Amino acid sequence: MKIYNTLTKSKEEFKPLEEGKVKMYVCGPTVYNDIHIGNARPMIVFDTVRRYFEYKGYEVNYVSNFTDVDDKIIKKANEEGVTCREITERYIKSVKEDMKAMNVKPATVHPRATEEIDGMIEMIKTLIDKGHAYEKNGTVYFRTRSFAGYGKLSKKNIDELESGARIAVNEEKEDPLDFVLWKPKKEGEPAWPSPWSEGRPGWHIECSEMSKKYLGDQIDIHAGGEDLIFPHHENEIAQSEAANGKEFATYWIHNGFLNIDNKKMSKSEGNFFTVKEIGAKFPLEVLRFFMLSVHYRNPINFSRELMEATQTGLERIKTAVFNLNSLLKSVEDKAMSEEEKKELENVAALQAKFEAAMDDDFNTADAVSVIFELVKLANSTVTGQNSKEFVQKTADEITKLCDILGVVAEQEEELLEEEIEQLIEERQAARKAKNFARADEVRNLLLEKGIVLEDTREGVRWKRV
Ligand code: AMP
Ligand code: ZN
């Protein structure tokens, strides 16, 4: 498996720190509004990376934070006259809904910055003790020049950075390149006690600490959008490596940006969409499939036409699987013919091609093309004369490859009315027999299929939700 590493600017063979395991940290959103479709890109892309590792048999420990203390959150809370906590709770709930609708798996852990302040204070203390940080008037700064490797990720030269840095009047920093680890509170801001002042952490230290706490000093992969390379990830490396004395992450991977109609997405230009806005127009699995149609390092252009084309493509896949599943009900359960066995070799070759694409720096664009090749093959070869085993294997292959990308190819069959009535009767009988466990089981089973029961005086009513 090869991964493009921003740190070395080259594709490298993936070698985990520990055999069979992947430890990865993905910088998460600042929770002050509904996420936009640009924020959705790293979520979908790195969830797919995770799924592919899992498919390959790795155990993935996937950590992604919520930044829940930030100027934008404070501003929003003041505008609405509510607490920061109300804002962050609201938007964490919102982002979780969006993730579910895009079939992004919950992380192994979703730490929140405000719940990890003690650890951040400890890390800052270590940095001060080691001479990598200093305090001035309640603020703690990282002494950038004390870290020899500064600039290694973004390929920036420290002296060039220095000459470009603006030196503000009354600068309390020793050097304009130094950045904040801890800052004292201003009136009306959330704050925590610390040895230096009542205040809050800087953004970069949050990720260094949460990654250390949940994954250890060293991790395999650190990921995020390409805008985070500098200064965020550069500063994370400086803090973590200075504090822990070890290489932080082996691979740094970054997604390209999403543009709209070939222009930068921006609120002021009016070309700005939240995931929820797109969700009102398209099923969000279409957005996921769309994101994967382009290699994650390239820019991706979003437009209604491209989304419509993606939706048509996805429907083609689903229809093929639906047709195969329908055939399964009528085809003969007989031994596979020699011809079918040969045909399955072509199917296996396509799976190998899919894996080769994914092994080459997660080339989902090529992987998606392979799925379409497979669908074409299925549509042109499978008929009612085939054996059940052959039809099943072909359907399973399409479903499996889609599943690796987090795309559901198999529509769940809706329960028929008579099946619902039958289950309701079974539940009533279970209740009569005081077998409440079974009665609940049936109710939950119906719920999973989108059927809600309502017990009324006239009997049980049901509706689809
Ligand atoms: P933020 O909440 O701004 O820190 O962003 C959360 C994540 O979304 C980061 O990994 C950003 O790099 C990423 N991101 C923000 N805007 C875009 C965009 N237009 N295209 C792709 N990724 C983006
Ligand atoms: Zn981060």
Image: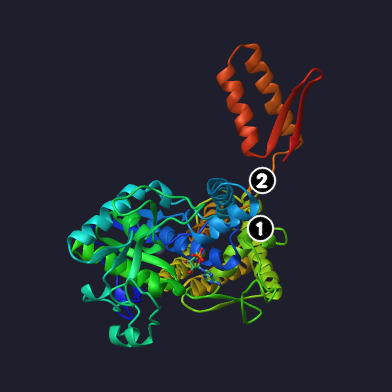
Q: Position of residue 235 (x, y in %)?
A: 33, 69
Identify the secondary structure beneath mark 2: loop
* Residue farthest right in this picture: 458
Q: Is mark 1 within 8 Å of ligand 1?
A: no
The circle drawn on residue 310 is none
Q: Residue at x 57, y 63 (%)?
A: 288
For this rendering, which residue is in front, 56 or 179? Answer: 179
Instruction: Count how many numbered circles sit on residues in the image.
Output: 2
Q: Position of residue 147 (x, y in %)?
A: 22, 73
Left or right of 331? Residue 92 is left
Reading the image, the residue beneath label 2 is: 413
For this rendering, which residue is in front, 306 or 398? Answer: 306
Q: CA distance from mark 1 to mark 2?
A: 26 Å
* Residue farthest front in this picture: 170
Q: Is residue 454 above or below residue 266?
A: above
Left or right of 93? Residue 243 is left
Reading the image, the residue beneath label 1 is: 276
Q: Residue at x 64, y 63 (%)?
A: 274
For this rendering, which residue is in front, 454 or 397? Answer: 454
Which amino acid is tagged 2?
Glu
Point out the tag, 1 or 2, that comes first from the N-terminus: 1
Q: Quadrant of residue 348?
A: bottom left
10 Å neighbourhood of mark 1: few (<14), some, or many (≥20)? some
Which amino acid is tagged 1?
Lys
